[in-house]
Amino acid sequence: MEMTNKIKFKHQTFCERLKSMLKVDFRRMFTSSLFYIMAGVCLVVPILIVVMTTMMDGTVSVDPNTGAETVIEAFDNVWQTIGSVSGEGSAMSMDLTGMCNINLVYFFAAVFICIFISDDFRSGYAKNLFTVRANKGDYVASKTIVGFIGGAFMLIAFFLGSMLGGAISGLPFDTPAGTSGIVMCMISKIFLLAVFVSIYVLASVIGKQKLWQSLVGSLMIGMLFFMMIPMLIPLDAGMMNVLLSLVGGALFAFGLGSASNHILKKTSLV
């Protein structure tokens, strides 16, 4: 009697493959110095901004060429480092409170994601990964999720840094937005992060091992959306802002994720 041994390979579902990729990427993120450096920067920057501007409040600088005087104005309260209340200032404001606030984290996230993905291609890890096991769609989804979680930690670190900076400098914590508005504002900013992360992942898979190209593309495109953030997510945000940020983030993640997957399939990995 002749017996035939048949070897059956279990077909992994998308969720199983994604879970495996996420385990690897989260391990890499939480064991790399890059993540902790970026989170540390996000914690320290608001402290320096708040303390230094408070110390220099009222200082006048004169342009030697034109004679124009510029007066440095400090933040009126701690919450200006998080955002502005609806109707306060313009979405295109270029003043201190309009530029040096928590929205800077969206650019810090670009640096983190571009370096994180570029290392995969420069080290040859991505090529080996796609050869032996991973689907390119799984790779894009995993990087988008990990980048989103990493960026969320950076936003929280900046928030904590703002609170510490306000306490050190003695700025008031009074705000017309109320506690609920601030909570909704932070949740909305975290959800909106998915839009920027999807852009950065797309730029990174286009640039691959060329880190400078990924960074330039990410920062240029990110700048186009940067000025819209105060208008989309004011300090007194509500549930509508949360829903819009959630839906927008999901749509961008799916749409640009599909584009990133297509680029990886159609281009060389080196």
Image: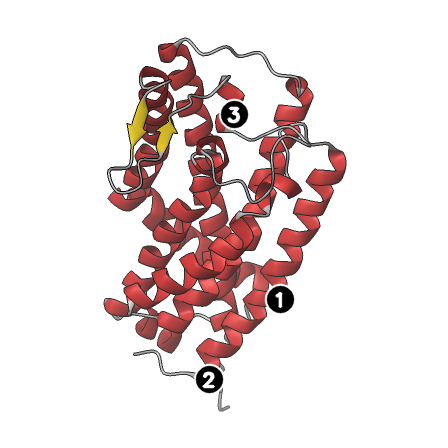
Earlier along the polypeptide chain: callout 2 or callout 3? Answer: 3
User: Looking at the image, which residue is at 57% across and 54% down?
Assistant: 195
Query: What amino acid is found at the position of numbered circle 1 in the picture?
Result: Gly
Question: In this rendering, would 148 be left or right of 116?
Answer: right
Q: Quadrant of residue 64?
A: top left
Tell me the element at label 3: helix
Residue pointed to by mark 2? 266
Say if 227 sits above or below 217 in the image: above
Provide the secondary structure element on which disc 1 rests. Answer: helix
Q: Which mark is residue 255?
A: 1
**Residue plotted at (30% across, 28% down):** 61
Task: Give neighbour class at mark 2: few <14, some 14-19, many 20+ (Cα, 10 Å).
Answer: few
Q: Looking at this view, name the residue that lies furthest to the right.
A: 240
Query: Which percent across, then down, holds residue 1?
Result: 50, 90
Above or below, 98 against 167 in this view is below
Q: Nearer the viewer, residue 270 or 217?
A: 217
Label 3 crowd bin: few (<14), some (14–19), many (20+), radius 10 Å: many
Element class at badge 2 = helix
Report crowding for label 1: few under 14, some 14 to 19, many 20 or more residues within 10 A (C-alpha). few
Amino acid type indicated by mark 3: Gln
Q: Which residue is mark 3?
A: 80
